[in-house]
Image: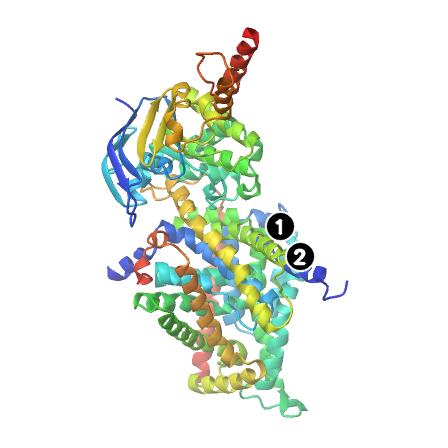
Amino acid sequence: MPENTPQASQDKFSRMPDRLSFYLERGSPFHRLNPLTKLTLVFCLIILAFFGPGYWLPSLLYLAVLIPLSLWSGVGREFMRTSIRLLLPLFGFLFVMQSLFYPGGRTVLVSLWIFAIKAEGIAFAYLTATRILVMVSSFLLLLLGTHPSALMNDFARRGVPAPLTYIIASTLQILPQMQAKAATIIDAQRSRGLETEGGLGKRVRALLPLVGPLVFGSLVDVEERAIALEARAFNSRRVKTSLVEIPDSQVERLARWTMLLLMLLALASRAWLSFKSRV
Amino acid sequence: MAIVQVEGLSYTYPLAISPALQDINLSVEQGEFVAVIGANGAGKSTLCYTLAGFIPHFFKGNLQGSARVAGLDTSQTSLAEMVVRVGLVFQNPFNQISGAKFTVYEEIAFGLENIGLGRQEMKNRVEKVMALTGIADLAHRSPYALSGGQQQRVALASILVMEPEVLVLDEPTSQLDPIGTREVFQVIKEMSRQGITIVMAEHKLEWVAEFADRVIALAEGRMLLDGKPREVLVDPALPAGHIGISRYTSLARRATQQGLWPAGRRLPVTLDEAADGFREARRAA
Amino acid sequence: MRLVESIKKDFNTMTLVLIPVAIAINIVIGQIVLVLKLPVFLDSIGTVLVGALCGPWAGALTGTLSNIIWGLAIDPNSFPWFPVALFIGFVSGWCAIAGLFKTWWKVIITGILVAFTAAIVSTPIAVYLYGGITASGVSFITAFLLQTGRDLVTAVLSANFIVEPVDKVATALLAYAIIKGLSVRYLARFPRADNVSA
């Protein structure tokens, strides 16, 4: 289908992402782990990647820890596909920027017009890229293997304030609703002749009729939704209880403490290394 | 002691010029099913919010007189404590989904978590109320993946699960189709049968006639009428208060003008009464 | 404790319900702008709205969560920039308390202040990500200058220099327009409604 027919551009709007929850139901042992354990794992991997010793550590963490974990939890294919897809643009940008502009780079590999690609830049780009890869993909793994309600319930049980868990859960649920409403408004406006293609002026003028009804419609609801929240005794002074208890185990508790230790070791090793380099 | 006792109640919203309610006196006995009718802006919603404690705590404004509901003075008791004894359900099903929970089961239990109920008791109550409202098969669905009628039943269940003594409903079926309306009314009637006091603002007069024990008509913030459905709903004062009358009443009135309604027979407010009346007229003819 | 009270004041029930809606507004408008291929972001209108109506702390929370959820749903490359989103909410909150949300002109000033803050906060992040404060002892100021130098090149390449202030001023003005379109009675529900009343 030619790119600039009305139908083609219609698809562009309806393709706005509406899957907010990455969660994939797999029933694996990883899925059954307590959410806090998985969250601790995420932070442990991130700290190790950013502060741990060794140039190849982040790559190692991704290949030898994250990918096997993803396979073990049955989400391997989605994990690898999504982590690469999400990060390819960043890597491209990083490589370009840092290979050309990395400060202190001396080893010129290629010279193009006024730009020179330096080896130190490429090396640094790779390090930064793999670090960010570990950060993003470990969160991705967490989300693929943890249902948002399990995460929220566990947070609430561990004492995260109710307003915060409410805000996070509520956002995750109403965002797809808003996106669907936006798609409807866009359709309705375009059927009334609103132009969303063409020169900059036209596109700018398209913004308000698209945004206005959506914004005001959702803001008006806020008052009633606040009333509904009060009607469920949300602001009660009584101590809140929880319906669902996510299981936890001694083994997991031990694992979490071990990971905490690893994090401290990584931070200590970084402090030690930079101390050494100054002396 | 009446379960709802309102005396000399007047209320003005903040920044408003004229009062929304003026000198309301109302007494409701436990277990009664009271319908509140009136034109838009007559004060139905305001009265509902007052009985549930949202006026004055949520809306602020100027409240005079007193309202005692389920033994609690609405001005003196905190809103969080009021809502445990007085439940509020309103029009828009979508806005009553809290958003805090991802399944219908947990959504219903949300209020119970907030008041600190034990886990087993929570489960018992949730299952009971899901059976009552006929939504047991929706337990594991997302509350946002439901129809309007289903969402309204979830909202109703979420309030009923807290076992309020008084249930206040502000036009709960306005946004529902006829089937959804009937489902909701049936649940409410069952709650009434179980002894919960119901105060319901409603436009659909045929339903009011069928289900309510008592009807109160408001006009411009004042009480216009207070009595049995079959008296209030045919009262000639209604049009003066810009309140409609049911189709059956309206039809029978026109029929009377043409001599087709039995002379002296009271005007109908429900389909059955209308059918009986016309049958009698046909036999006499 | 005055700080704790100041934080608590921002959060009433209306705030809690507004924040998710504001985050959704951020994300949806941000997406629409992407699809319309406009040269701005406009992904913080909700954040500024919360900052103005509820306060700096609520604004900061809105910005942070909005950034995190945008990262989860659309583009994880935006995660490192969460302090920028945080400060957008924080600064608009304080500007509003200082009375800078009462007229069109003052709102433009708010927009400029927010843009300025965003630029300052994003610099160390950019330096770390794209240039690196390496262990070879490059001082922060040198890195900043280098980063600015690099930014000039980037600016020439992408006209970023002009886009950021335009984006933030437009964001502030749109938030103001939204507030102006809401009834006084409705606005009075929010903790810092006096920020926006004349």
Q: Chain of mark 2?
A: A
Q: Chain of mark 1?
A: A
Counting from the top left corner in percent of width and height, residue C94 is at 33, 67
Provide the residue designation for mark 1: A24
Q: Residue at x 28, y 41 (%)?
A: B19
Disc 2 vs disc 1: Cβ atoms closer than 8 Å? yes
Between B166 and A255, which is closer to the camera in this rendering?
B166
Provide the residue designation for mark 2: A78
Note whether A5 is above or below B67 in the view shown.
below
Counting from the top left corner in percent of width and height, residue C16 is at 40, 52
Q: Are marks 2 and 1 on the same chain?
A: yes
Mark closer to the chain start, 2 or 1: 1
For badge 2, the amino acid type reads: Glu
Counting from the top left corner in percent of width and height, residue B242 is at 40, 33
Q: Label 2: few (<14), some or many (≥20) within 10 Å?
A: some
Q: Quadrant of the C terminus of chain C?
A: bottom left
Q: Is residue B2 left or right of residue B185?
A: left
Report which quarter residue B49 is drawn in.
top left
Q: Secondary structure at mark 1?
A: loop
For badge 1, the amino acid type reads: Leu
Note whether B217 is above or below A243 in the view shown.
above
